[in-house]
């Protein structure tokens, strides 16, 4: 592999490993888009911290063994780059009607619209998350957590660049228009909302942030894994590098929730509280009670389930057939990779009951990806349960049933309990505050959200991390706040 593919050229205004200097048309188009991006970052990026020095990693290579460099940097000066994982030699299309053909380096004309739609939807989520999280800096439980939030934010900004590069390079004029629209839509806006449901929801507090990065960034992982299988090689290579960054986002979610759970259990034990449902007593300790953590989990898991689209979907069948978007770990699945005759069991609402129904596997690829996602989530939940068990508290967190609180697909418009029992509207209205965060829960959590900005100090409701970022000591000043 030559060095100019592995290493990133930082002498350029737009760092990249795609040889932009020799691609005048795309370079000019991106330079035209850049000022609008910076305006967007300044308007919609982390509020109140644009002048702070943040200890951030920047990707300087795409070598899996060492691609990041850590340094203090002001976020608006972050070097957002265009980085594609190295090409795999002689890569063949791993699924769909083009199975076995050499991968495409250009967009096949017949699939242009379909592919553009995938790139636009993927791209739209990235700035959306930055917008959703822009207020959280003001209530960070520590400088360590503040830094992690900002690391995620700048990398989601880079993920937007990744998709915008594809739009400018491969989709001509309409690609340029789509890239401009990415900076025009706003999370939660009435007139120009972001495209997918979960990306228009609020992220009001840090428990929500950790749930979001655990559940919604994990949808990102699953979707990127599927797109990394694409027969369109530039998309595949882009997604492969994004996945290396995604791992950190999920780490922040998982350790964040784990540290909150740990702190709550430790505080309960120290105070001699045995009953996890003694909510007022637990809250009086300045920690978040486990039932409230369960409610937040219910909310963010189900919002993220909706991101997989309908269980049975012709859109999904078409993009699979066209060899544009594959399945999770496509190449390790033992089947024909065309799904001409296979079936897949789909949980559906039939004759008033929830039943498993065999569907053509081709139309059920969304369902399959969602099942893979659920398994991945469940493993994480078990790791939380280990913490609770180790600290001797009698409580288990669990994923709710997939029919609970859904707005997309088979269970849209129905009401079900977290264990999957169908109920009517009035029962739902009566009970829902037991299952989803209520106004009062939100107010309680908000009352805990006081910023902590002494190096090495943490808010009452969260345990310190086991290790620092980049092996830094516990009292490291991850963010130097501007005076
Ligand atoms: N909200 O056949 P259907 C990430 C629409 S996250 C609103 O059911 P399809 C990240 C759908 O667009 C990963 N609308 O589903 C995480 C369609 O509308 P049109 C993001 C929805 O198309 C954290 C209609 O319903 N990447 O990276 O098979 C931080 C019928 O669609 C929703 C991707 O999603 C919804 N939830 O699947 C930062 C990958 N669901 O076209 C970043 C690219 C469906 O009829 N996207 N609809 O008007 C896709 O592969 C697919 O578009 C989806 C939907 C899986 C999202
Ligand atoms: Fe992302
Ligand atoms: Fe992410």
Image: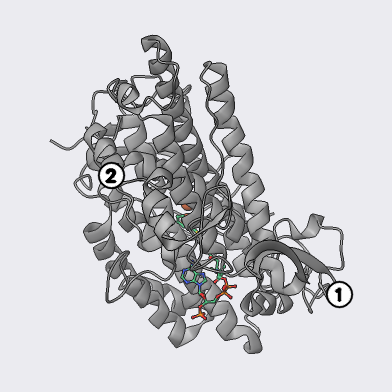
Q: Quadrant of residue 353?
A: bottom right
- Left or right? Give the position of 374 relative to 395: right
Direction left: furthest residue? 483
- Left or right? Give the position of 439 relative to 239: left
Foreground mark, 1 or 2, reads 1
Q: Residue at x 62, y 52 (%)?
A: 373
Q: How many marks?
A: 2
Q: Residue at x 22, y 44 (%)?
A: 49
Q: Secondary structure at mark 1?
A: loop
How much space separates mark 1 and mark 2, taking CA atoms? Answer: 49 Å
Q: Secondary structure at mark 2?
A: helix
Image x and y of residue 457, in percent = 29, 21
Q: Earlier in the sequence, mark 1 or mark 2?
A: 2
Q: Name the quarter where the C terminus is drawn.
A: top left
Of residues 357 and 119, the one nearer the viewer is: 357
Q: Residue at x 28, y 43 (%)?
A: 442
Colour pattern: one colour
Image x and y of residue 478, in percent = 33, 31
Q: Quadrant of residue 15?
A: bottom left
Query: Badge 2: how crowded within 10 Å, few (<14), some, or many (20+)?
Result: many
The answer to whether residue 12 is visible is: no
Image x and y of residue 39, in percent = 24, 64
Query: Badge 1: how crowded within 10 Å, few (<14), some, or many (20+)?
Result: few
Image x and y of residue 361, in percent = 77, 70
The answer to whether residue 95 is visible is: yes
Of residues 253 and 30, the one nearer the viewer is: 253
Point out which mark residue 136 bears.
2
Q: Name the quarter where the N terminus is drawn.
A: bottom right
Point out which mark residue 341 bears.
1
Point out which mark residue 239 bears.
none
């Amino acid at each position: 592999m030559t060095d100019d593919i592995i290493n990133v050229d930082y002498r350029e205004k737009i760092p990249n490993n795609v040889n932009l200097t020799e691609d005048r048309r795309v370079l000019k188009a991106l330079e035209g888009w850049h000022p609008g991006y910076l305006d967007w970052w300044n308007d919609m990026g982390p509020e109140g911290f644009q002048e702070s020095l943040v200890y951030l990693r920047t990707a300087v290579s795409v070598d899996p063994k060492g691609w990041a460099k850590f340094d203090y940097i002001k976020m608006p000066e972050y070097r957002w780059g265009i980085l594609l994982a190295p090409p795999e030699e002689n890569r063949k299309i791993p699924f769909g009607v083009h199975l076995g053909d050499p991968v495409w380096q250009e967009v096949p004309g017949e699939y242009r619209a379909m592919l553009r739609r995938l790139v636009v939807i993927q791209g739209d989520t990235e700035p959306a998350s930055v917008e959703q999280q822009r207020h959280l800096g003001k209530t960070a439980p520590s400088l360590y957590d503040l830094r992690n939030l900002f690391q995620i934010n700048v990398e989601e900004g880079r993920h937007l660049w990744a998709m915008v590069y594809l739009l400018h390079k491969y989709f001509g004029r309409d690609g340029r228009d789509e890239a401009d629209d990415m900076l025009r839509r706003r999370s939660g806006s009435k007139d120009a909302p972001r495209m997918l449901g979960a990306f228009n929801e609020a992220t009001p507090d840090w428990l929500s942030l950790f749930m979001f990065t655990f559940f919604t960034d994990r949808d990102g992982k699953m979707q990127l894994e599927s797109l990394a299988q694409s027969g369109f090689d530039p998309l595949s290579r882009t997604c492969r590098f994004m996945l290396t960054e995604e791992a950190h986002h999920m780490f922040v979610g998982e350790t964040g929730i784990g540290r909150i759970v740990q702190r709550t259990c430790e505080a309960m034990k120290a105070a001699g509280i045995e009953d996890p449902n003694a909510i007022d007593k637990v809250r009086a300790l300045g920690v978040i009670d486990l039932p409230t953590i369960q409610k937040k989990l219910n909310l963010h898991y189900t919002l993220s389930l909706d991101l997989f689209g309908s269980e049975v979907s012709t859109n999904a069948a078409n993009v699979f057939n066209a060899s544009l978007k594959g399945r999770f770990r496509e190449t390790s699945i033992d089947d024909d990779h065309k799904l001409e005759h296979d079936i897949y069991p789909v949980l559906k609402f039939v004759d008033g009951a929830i039943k498993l129904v065999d569907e053509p596997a081709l139309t059920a690829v969304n369902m399959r990806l969602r099942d893979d996602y659920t398994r991945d989530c469940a493993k994480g939940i078990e790791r939380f349960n280990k913490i609770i068990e180790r600290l001797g508290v009698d409580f288990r967190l669990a994923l709710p049933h997939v029919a609970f609180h859904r707005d997309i697909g088979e269970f849209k418009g129905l009401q079900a309990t977290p264990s999957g029992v169908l109920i009517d509207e009035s029962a739902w209205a009566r009970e829902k505050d037991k299952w989803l965060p209520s106004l009062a829960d939100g107010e309680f959590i908000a009352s805990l959200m006081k910023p902590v900005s002494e190096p090495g100090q943490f808010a009452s409701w969260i345990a310190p991390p086991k290790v620092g970022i980049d092996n830094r000591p516990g009292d490291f000043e991850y963010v130097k706040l501007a005076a």
